[in-house]
Image (tube, rainbow, N blue to C red):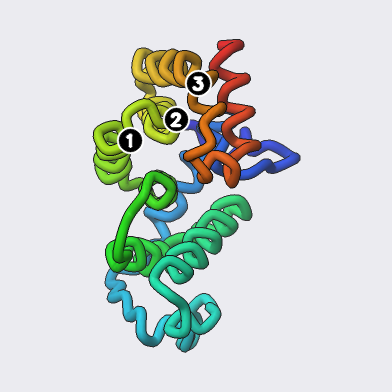
């Protein structure tokens, strides 16, 4: 994996880095591994009470499970975009615990959990989430997006090409569906992924 020297000057949303700067995402993953605390016990009830040297958070105890996961997902992704591996390492256990506490899980939640797993270097966990997406929501674009990200980071050229093929085949029909509200939230990502699949 290349180091951070290839970091783009104009950083875009980190979630599309698998297409434009996979090596840079790898640098964040490496940084998380180096900065992850030896012991971390998520305490969701006290997540808003930051201790000395910890990352300040809003009062998560007042949020619903869905809001809690969304808040932590956003913070982890923003930290990744800012190359703040210490914050990613600090907040990711809380985000993983918040995902596990969800009353129900849809494709969007699985996708977000998969992105967190990639961000912290848990590639087996991200693969499992992508596989579940493929089983529970056949044809969904989020499955091959996760698989493409993983293939790019793992140096699996064939897997990356396969993911692009699936995206290219599925995108026209999938993006026309009105029953996938998660596509609206990720419109920019999906547009750029589709363009990449068509040109690579």
How many C-alpha atoms fall within 10 Å of the one at disc 1: few (<14), some, or many (≥20)? Answer: some
Q: Which of marks 3 and 2 is in front?
A: 3
Name the disc covering residue 141, or none.
2
Residue 135 visible in the picture: yes
Q: How far apart, in angstroms, are the residues tagged by discs 3 and 1? A: 14 Å
Residue 86 visible in the picture: no
Q: Do the residues labelled 3 and 2 touch (CB within 8 Å)?
A: no
Q: Nearer the viewer, mark 1 or mark 2?
A: 1
Q: Circle 1 sits on which residue?
A: 137
Q: Circle 3 sits on which residue?
A: 173
How many C-alpha atoms fall within 10 Å of the one at disc 3: few (<14), some, or many (≥20)? Answer: few
Residue drawn at 38 percent across, 23 percent down: 155
Coordinates of residue 40 in the picture (x, y in percent) = 30, 72
Where 147 falls versus 12 (above or below)?
A: above
Q: How far apart, in angstroms, are the residues tagged by discs 1 and 2? A: 9 Å
Residue drawn at 56 percent across, 27 percent down: 176
Q: Are marks 1 and 2 in contact (CB under 8 Å)?
A: no
Q: Say what secondary structure mark 3 lies in.
A: helix
Where 35 falls versus 154 (above or below)?
A: below
Near-viewer residue (151 or 34): 151
Lower sequence index among marks 3 and 1 = 1
The C terminus lies in quadrant: top right
How many C-alpha atoms fall within 10 Å of the one at disc 2: few (<14), some, or many (≥20)? Answer: many
Where 35 falls versus 83 (above or below)?
A: below
């Amino acid at each position: 994996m290349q180091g951070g020297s290839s970091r783009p000057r104009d950083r875009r949303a980190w979630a599309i880095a698998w297409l434009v700067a996979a090596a840079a995402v790898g640098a964040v993953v490496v940084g998380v591994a180096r900065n992850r605390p030896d012991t971390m016990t998520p305490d969701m009830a006290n997540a808003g009470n930051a201790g000395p040297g910890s990352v300040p958070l809003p009062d998560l105890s007042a949020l619903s499970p869905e809001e809690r996961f969304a808040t932590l997902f956003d913070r982890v992704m923003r930290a990744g975009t800012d190359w703040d591996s210490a914050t990613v390492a600090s907040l990711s256990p809380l985000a993983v615990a918040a995902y596990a506490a969800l009353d129900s899980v849809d494709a969007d939640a699985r996708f977000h959990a998969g992105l967190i797993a990639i961000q912290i270097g848990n590639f087996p966990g991200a693969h499992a989430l992508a596989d579940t997406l493929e089983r529970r929501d056949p044809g969904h674009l989020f499955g091959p997006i996760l698989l493409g990200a993983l293939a790019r980071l793992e140096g699996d050229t064939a897997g990356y090409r396969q993911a692009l093929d699936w995206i290219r085949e599925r995108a026209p029909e999938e993006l026309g569906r009105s029953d996938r509200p998660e596509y609206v939230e990720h419109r920019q990502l999906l547009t750029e992924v589709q363009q990449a699949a068509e040109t690579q």
